[in-house]
Amino acid sequence: MTDPIADVRSIQIERPADHVLRIVLDRADRRNAQDPRMLYQLNDAFDLAGQDDEVKVVILAGEGPTFSAGHDLRAAFAVTDEGQRRAEWGDHPAVSCWGGFTQPGAEGWMAMEEELFLGLCWRWRNFPKPTIAATQGKVIAGGLMLAWVCDLIIAGDDATFSDPVVAFGLNGHEYFVHAWELGARKAKELLFTGGAITAEEARALGMVNRVVPREQLADATLALAVRIAAMPSLGLKLAKQAVNQSLDAQGQWTALQAALSLHEIGHSHNREVHGSVVDPTGAERIRRLSAAGT
Ligand code: ZN
């Protein structure tokens, strides 16, 4: 069978073993930064994996030394007319019910974030088959979002995880499950400092399942996927749904929506005060703090 989107530019789709589909972020020259096209291609790949009954487990990996450095800040996420939207986002129809992407001010920006960031992440979080993120190098902000929507996370021993978005005048990235992933206290430390945690720290916190030598990341992740794929597909789906429903019962979706509301306040404030949706001193702040080693 020919994968209908195997030739897309920003991701690759591989079938490394029976019942296992591997989606590879393939913009190593941009540290796998996510632009709107990559996000839609990723969504197409999840749809393909979901509809293909031969696929039981999905691996999400990144080509090159960096899993993903976050959203591609060079890409045009804000669009002012439909022609620009198609040019920047591609011809994909919206996946959510949101529209109004070309509206001025907070209306258009919020619609974009609901569609491309929270909407897609929540959709992938609820993908019915087991997913495993294979992470290496820097996993930053939007990169962390991609890892967190997966059911399991395997980390190369060189992986570091951060969400330095507070430096840019926001609460954190748009998929705000920090307290579930890290515990409330470490979540606050990660956010307040803008610093990174190591793979081993992430494992100790329960955020990462296993840490393996970097050169063994692909093989170790595949071996885990093959073991999971030996289980009946229905049992896997039911187990995943049951755990996700436990998180839902704790109010995870409600908390995510509330956090996005605060996030939009941040963007609106920054636009009013700084003339851009993020505090323009953010990158320099992080550089200074990283150089000081604090
Ligand atoms: Zn945002």
Image (tube, grey):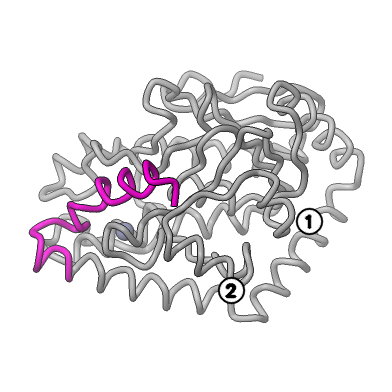
Q: Is mark 2 within 8 Å of ligand 1?
A: no
Front one among 3 and 215: 215
Secondary structure at badge 1 equals: helix
The N terminus, quarter of image? top right
Ligand 1 position by quadrant:
bottom left
Question: Which residue appears farthest toward the front when viewing the image?
Answer: 292
Type of amino acid at the residue the image marks with label 2:
Ala
Front one among 213 and 94: 213
Q: Is mark 1 within 8 Å of ligand 1?
A: no
Marks 2, 1: nearer the viewer? 2
The relative height of residue 240 versus residue 130 in the rendered view (above or below) is below
For label 2, the residue is 184
For label 1, the residue is 237
Locate residue 32 relative to residue 58 in the image: left or right. Answer: left
What residue lies at 65% left-to-right and 41% top-to-bottom? 133
Type of amino acid at the residue the image marks with label 1:
Lys
Secondary structure at badge 2 equals: helix
Residue 123 coordinates in the image, percent (x, y) = 53, 56
